[in-house]
Image (cartoon, rainbow, N blue to C red):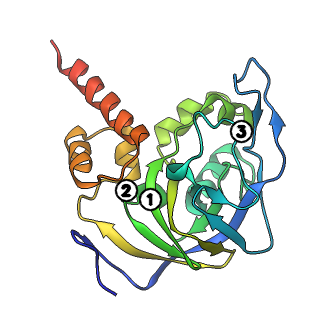
């Protein structure tokens, strides 16, 4: 196996899928908490392998298609290690699906994955495409005070993934990182915008990034420009 141009490759497993989650039921969201009306954030583990398509997992969907879903947000992964840290802070169990994730994984620093990184999972090929941006529906679902602010400050966002090769995924599947882009810009870097020069490098290096990511970079650029003004 050889690396793609401008990156590195590993063939040994670096992570494991602990659970695969799809929508359990749509929920009504109170108008005071969100304008979307309904949400598919209630995701639960399933005991069998799930086909993975370009737009996501069979049996899964989103309600707010304006802000969620699509090819660049087809699959959402969250790290068990980050979930445990939140469980310790909140004082309760946060089982697979609590974050609205499709994949609960271990052994892989999901929030610090490099954008454009490619994961072989089961017989699928997935590509890290964006951080998860917390919203008012997520706040409502958790029932935790100031959740959006707290989640933002932690910046353990998990990662959205594009589906490059369709297949199926099940609990226990190994995750192999097949390619890591040389630019090194991580999901966390994009979410926090702490290093705008690195984000410019991302624009130059990853032509496949989504319009949403380009808008995030532009917001960070304008924020830093405003802070620099006397």
Give the SS element for disc 3.
loop
First along the sequence among labels 3 and 2: 3
Label annotation for residue 63: 3
Residue 43: x and y in percent read 75, 52
Quarter of the image where the C terminus is located: top left
> Which sits earlier in the primary sequence, circle 2 or circle 1?
2
Query: Total marks drawn?
Result: 3
**Label 3, label 2: how far apart the Cα atoms are:** 26 Å
Residue beneath disc 2? 115
Q: What is the C-alpha distance between the residues marked 2 and 1? A: 5 Å
Sequence-wise, the earlier of marks 1 and 3 is 3
* Disc 2 to disc 1: CB gap under 8 Å: yes
Q: Residues within 10 Å of mark 2 (few under 14, many from 20)?
A: many
Which mark is on residue 74?
none
Vertical placement of 64 versus 184: above or below?
A: above
Residue 128, numbered circle: 1
């Amino acid at each position: 196996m050889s690396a793609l141009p401008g990156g590195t490759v590993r063939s040994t497993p670096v992570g494991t899928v602990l659970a695969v989650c799809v929508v359990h039921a749509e929920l009504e969201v109170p108008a005071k908490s969100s304008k979307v009306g309904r949400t598919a954030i209630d995701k639960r583990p399933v005991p069998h392998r799930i086909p993975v398509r370009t737009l996501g997992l069979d049996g899964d969907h989103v309600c707010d298609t304006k802000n969620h879903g699509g090819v660049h947000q087809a699959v959402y992964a969250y790290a068990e290690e980050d979930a445990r840290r939140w469980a310790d802070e909140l004082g309760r169990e946060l089982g697979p699906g609590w974050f609205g994730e499709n994949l609960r994984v271990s052994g892989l620093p999901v929030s610090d994955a490099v954008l454009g990184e490619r994961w072989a999972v089961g017989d699928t090929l997935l590509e890290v495409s964006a951080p998860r941006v917390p919203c008012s529906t997520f706040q409502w679902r958790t029932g935790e005070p100031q959740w959006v602010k707290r989640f933002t400050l932690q910046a353990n966002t998990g990662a959205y993934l594009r589906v490059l090769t369709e297949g199926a995924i099940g609990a226990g599947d190994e995750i192999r990182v097949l390619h890591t882009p040389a630019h090194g810009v991580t999901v966390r870097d994009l979410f926090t915008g702490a290093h705008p020069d690195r984000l410019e490098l991302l624009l130059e290096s990853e032509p496949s990034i989504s319009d949403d990511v380009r808008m995030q970079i532009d917001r960070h650029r304008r924020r830093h420009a405003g802070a620099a003004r006397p």
